[in-house]
Amino acid sequence: MKTVLITGSSRGIGAAIAKNLAKDYQIVINYNKSKDEAMNLLKELREINPMVIAIGADVSDEDQVEAMFKIIEDNFKNVDILINNAGISYFGLIQDTPFDKWLDVINTNLNSVFLNSKRAIPKMIEKKEGVIINISSIWGDFGASMESSYSTSKGAINTFTKAMAKELAPSNIRVNAIAPGMVDTDMMKRDFSPEEINQLKEEVGIKRLAKPEEIAGLVRYLISDEASYITGDIIHINGGFY
Ligand code: NAP
């Protein structure tokens, strides 16, 4: 069984990806603050597959990433598939954004993708096989008012995805990004009131938010051999938002 590391999989989209893949892959759940949620998920998934572990690590911190990969390598040898999913949002005007909040978003959303990919790549090159999926956002293409740090982090993820894909294609490693529109998770509920979410739904072709499971289904396809010719792409999944 191949090993999949899903960063930020205690909740939301990451947890849905772990649930979708647990039957067929060895899973590494990663959490930062939500240990209880991660432990509940671990218990649930172990009933399907004993080869699931959960590791606490802030994936924007190089030392913690290193410690996490050491635990993974002790348990499963290497990471075959890396899903860079961990992310946070920050909502506010540019002139009101404290610099440390800007840095938090860039460190968590973007620098974590660099740190985890950098750590996973050498063993993938050694095996001449690997897949990396970066969870981006529609705002990485279009930019969102009041979400400049978030939009910037996701735009940079898109560029990094394309650069990585070119560099790693000769080693048979595929790298793609998924750019969801609006997904029904804590992130949306934290940033928008129920009334605002209802207004936003009106702008979506399908007139609803995505379920996290719908993003997970796309991940399952993209990491499979059926997607063997897809690399360097930003795949949009937004219910006809634009
Ligand atoms: P969420 O429900 O708020 O979950 C975020 C996850 O990221 C949690 O599991 C959290 O873990 C983890 N995380 C945050 N900072 C971390 C860190 N420093 N180290 C390790 N884990 C960390 O958000 P979501 O909606 O599932 O978002 C998942 C990804 O999808 C993000 O990259 C987000 O930008 C992207 N996305 C979301 C939407 C949307 O509408 N929801 C749309 C497009 C893209 P802890 O709770 O354990 O700290």
Image (cartoon, rainbow, N blue to C red):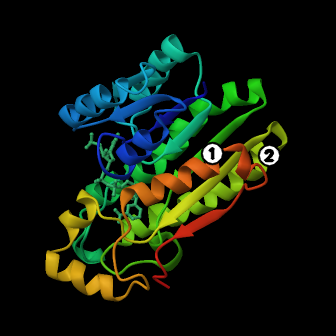
Q: Of the residues shown, which amino acid type is indicated by label 1?
A: Ile
Tag of residue 223? 1
Of all residues shown, which one is farthest toward the top? 74
Residue 18, relative to residue 179: is it above or below?
A: above
Image position, residue 44 (x, y; %): 30, 30
Mark nearer the viewer, 2 or 1: 1
Give residue 67's position: percent from left, percent from top: 42, 20
User: Type of residue at label 2?
Assistant: Ala
Q: Nearer the viewer, residue 97 or 70?
A: 70
The residue indicated by pointer 2 is 169
- Considering only vertical position in the picture, is 159 above or below 146? above
Q: Quadrant of the N terminus?
A: top right
Residue at x 58% of width, y 28% of height:
79
Q: Is mark 1 within 8 Å of ligand 1?
A: no
Q: Is residue 7 left or right of residue 81?
A: left
Residue at 23 percent of width and 58 percent of height: 186
Residue 102 point in image, percent of width and height = 33, 60
